[in-house]
Each structure stands twice: as structure tokens, then as C-alpha cells.
Amino acid sequence: MKDALSDTAIKAPSVTLIANVKADVVTDGDEIRDLLVEQVCGSVRWRESVLKMGQLGVDQLVEIGAGKVLSGLVRRIDRNIKGSNVQDMADIEAFVEAQS
């Protein structure tokens, strides 16, 4: 992973990014690259990351992909954050429509 990301330009995110390796906000592209590598071969702090999201006022999380494991975990960690799941384009379109 380190080699794959070494030549990849990573800009500062335009939205708040919480790195689940350290359960805190990250804004520096180089640090994001390092943390992505660390995430692959180390432990993540999912519970603390969800709690941080709650502290920052996050009230909705969208899980992308098969299954609803993360949405279920979020519900158990912070009941104020609503978890949703989208698996395909139809789900994404329905989700976007529901937000309008």
C-alpha cells in the first residue's frame, strides 16, 4: 500500500475527514497517505471515530457497499447518528431523492 500511494497526490480534503486509525480530524495530505497505510496493517478505532463524528455534529452516516454492519455498529455506539446503506445506483438515487 505504501508503494502504491507513494506517487499519488493527496490534497487536503474539502470536507471533514476523520481518520479511523487515530479517531481524529486530519487535514494534511501527507498525513492522510501515512494513515491509509497504517489503517491497512494496523488497528482502527471505529468506536472512537463514531463518537468523534457525534461530537462534530454528524447526524447521518451512509454506508456504501454490501451489508449493513457499519450502520448497525453506529446505531449501537451513538443513537443520534442515523445509519443508511446504499448498495447500487438504484439505492443511491433513492437516497438522494429522499434527501430532497
Image (cartoon, rainbow, N blue to C red):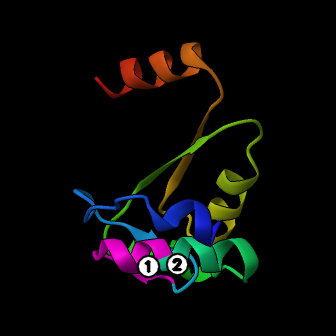
Name, please, the residue furthest toward the top. Answer: 90
Residue occupying the point 58% across, 81% down: 21
Could you give the CA–CA distance between mark 1 and mark 2, rounded to whole angstroms?
17 Å
Residue occupying the point 50% across, 23% down: 92
Q: Position of residue 17 (x, y in %)?
A: 37, 66
Mark 2: which secondary structure?
Answer: helix
Which label number is shown at residue 35?
2
Tell me the kind of residue under disc 2.
Leu
Name, please, the residue furthest toward the bottom. Answer: 22
Label 1 vs 2, first from the N-terminus:
2
Residue 13: quadrant of the picture: bottom left
Q: Quadrant of the N terminus?
A: bottom right
Q: Is residue 31 magenta?
A: yes
In this rendering, is residue 40 above or below 68?
Answer: below
Q: Which residues are magenta?
A: 23-33
Tell me the kind of residue under disc 1.
Lys
